[in-house]
Amino acid sequence: MRLVFLGPPGAGKGTQARELAREWGVVHLATGDMLREALAAGTGLGLEAKRYMDRGALVPDEVIIDLMRERLARPDAARGFIVDGFPRTIAQAEALASLLKDSGQALDRVIYFEISEPELLRRLTGRRICRRCQTVYHLISAPPRRPDVCDKCGGELYQREDDSEATVQHRLEVYAQQTAPLLAYYSERGLLVPVAGEGSIEAVRRAIRAVVGA
Ligand code: AMP
């Protein structure tokens, strides 16, 4: 199983990818998570990426493509994967296709999360994330049992700096300009499968299972 989860920030890609990857025994490759881990570890990559992430801009293609090249070469990726947050530009999509081709692989499907802008704004600005296990909460629609504490691991919940209202608006513009062209790109290649992203977490998960046949 080799899938890409495509859609605007806040569409639910990470939430779904994390659970479904576990269920299907494949790896979850989220470039945003990788960059945040690099930043937490204080690496050069993390510090360089921060300059872009804080503004809601995209990290340069070469940096992200190198990161994915290394990650896809690790043995666990051969079991299958869900990529989330990548590709975000046509150049990244082409690089992904050629990386996979080099190892005799290809994408099975690109799942596109369809969702309205007001709902994205609501989700992103209310989003809280566990520092330790990355579980995602929402202040209104999926609050933790105890404020600021993860139900699953007891870790501290935090708001991503780029989930502030001003940065969110810019991230949505960047998505429209640089990432939305991927819809036509994957549609032309017969890979794009839309899924309604506005339902409950469980409803969206069922819809994805149905289109993937899992
Ligand atoms: P995400 O967690 O997917 O919303 O990503 C957070 C931020 O990381 C983005 O706003 C970008 O600055 C950066 N980022 C993540 N994935 C990519 C990518 N594929 N290409 C460029 N920048 C990325």
Image (tube, helix red, strand yellow):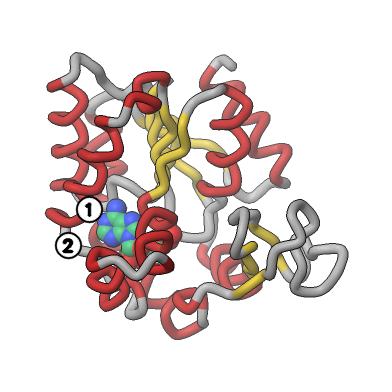
The disc labelled 1 sits on which kind of residue? Ile
Task: Tell which quarter ligand 1 is in.
Answer: bottom left
Instruction: Say which residue label 1 marks.
Output: 64
Q: Which residue is depicted at the point 44% across and 33% down?
A: 82
Q: Quadrant of residue 71?
A: top left
Where's residue 31, x and y in %? 36, 51
Is 113 in front, or is 44? 44
- Which of 31 and 124 lies nearest the eye of the viewer? 31
Q: Answer left or right for 91 relative to 127.
A: left
- The quadrant in which the N terminus is found is top left
Is residue 13 shown to the viewer in this render? yes
Task: Name the residue beneath numbered marker 2.
Answer: 60
Q: Position of residue 151 (x, y in %)?
A: 80, 57
Front residue of 14/198: it is 14
Q: Quadrant of the C terminus?
A: top right
Examine the image and state in which quarter residue 41 appears: bottom left
> Which residue lies at the image location 51% right of the left edge and 65% below the top edge?
117
Residue type for callout 2 = Pro
Mark 2 vs 1: CB contact within 8 A = yes
80 relative to 73 in the view: left or right: right
Measured as percent of width and height from the top left, residue 116 is found at: 54, 59
Please tell me in which quadrant of the rendered image residue 80 appears.
Answer: top left
- Residues packed near mark 1 inside 10 Å, few (<14), some (14 to 19) or many (20 plus): many
Residue located 71% across and 37% down the image: 203
Q: Residue furthest bottom?
A: 166
